[in-house]
Image (cartoon, grey):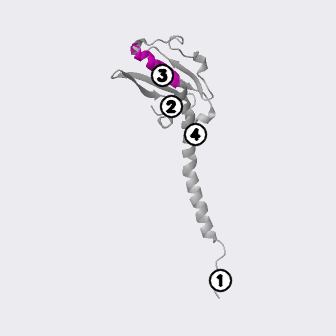
Amino acid sequence: MKKLQQGFTLIELMIVVAIIGILAAIAVPAYQDYTIRSRVSEAASLSGGVRTAMDVAFSEGYAIGSIPTTVASLNLSAAGSYKSKYVTSVGYTASGVVTITLTAEKSLGTAANDTVIYTPTNVGGNLRWALTGTVPTKYRPKN
């Protein structure tokens, strides 16, 4: 008589567990990087209003070195209102440089207390924003 196989052998189960372990070892660090990157992207979101105001001032004839820095002249909210769980402050200068400082939140990992800096340059009459700062490159938002 022929006996039918019922269930999996121990070797087959061990292979499945090993495959799941390998996938988890790759997926968990990638997921952590992804979540930190999404938290840091809040810096780009909160700086959007300031960068737009700088773009408008530039298009109205202000030179990059003489963009007005008062809240009223740029039609911005008070500087203290640009903060969130992951962003401490959004600052800007007459040269158009926008500096975003991140909080010390543990969930930001190595990006905690770092800065994201947007520096404008005049390219054919339009502002282009160069992205620098102390935030590790893999966590920086896109330009």
Q: Is residue 101 visible?
A: yes
Q: CA distance from mark 4 to mark 2?
A: 14 Å
The spot of residue 85 in percent (x, y) is 63, 28
What residue would you read off at disc 2? 135
Q: CA distance from mark 3 to mark 4?
A: 27 Å
Q: Is residue 88 left or right of residue 93?
A: right
Residue sitting at x 37%, y 22% = 126
How far apart are labels 3 and 2 at the CA level? 22 Å
| First in residue order: circle 2 vs circle 1 | 1
- The reply to whether callout 3 and callout 2 are in contact (CB within 8 Å) is no
Report the mark closest to the observer, 1 or 3.
3
User: Which mark, residue 69?
Assistant: none
Foreground label between 2 and 1: 1
User: In the rendered structure, does residue 53 fall within the stretch colored magenta?
Assistant: yes
Any part of residue 96 in sight: no
Local packing at callout 1 (Cα closer than 10 Å; few below 14, some 14-19, many 20+) is few
* Lateral position of residue 32 relative to residue 136, left or right: right
Q: CA distance from mark 1 to mark 3?
A: 75 Å
Residue range highlighted in magenta: 47-63
Taking the spot 54% from the left edge, 45% from the top edge, the residue there is 30
Provide the residue designation for mark 4.
Answer: 35
Q: Residues within 10 Å of mark 4 (few under 14, many from 20)?
A: some
Asked whether residue 56 is drawn in magenta, I would say yes
Q: Which mark is residue 3?
A: 1
User: Which amino acid does the dot numbered 2 rest on?
Assistant: Val
Question: Label 3: which residue?
Answer: 52
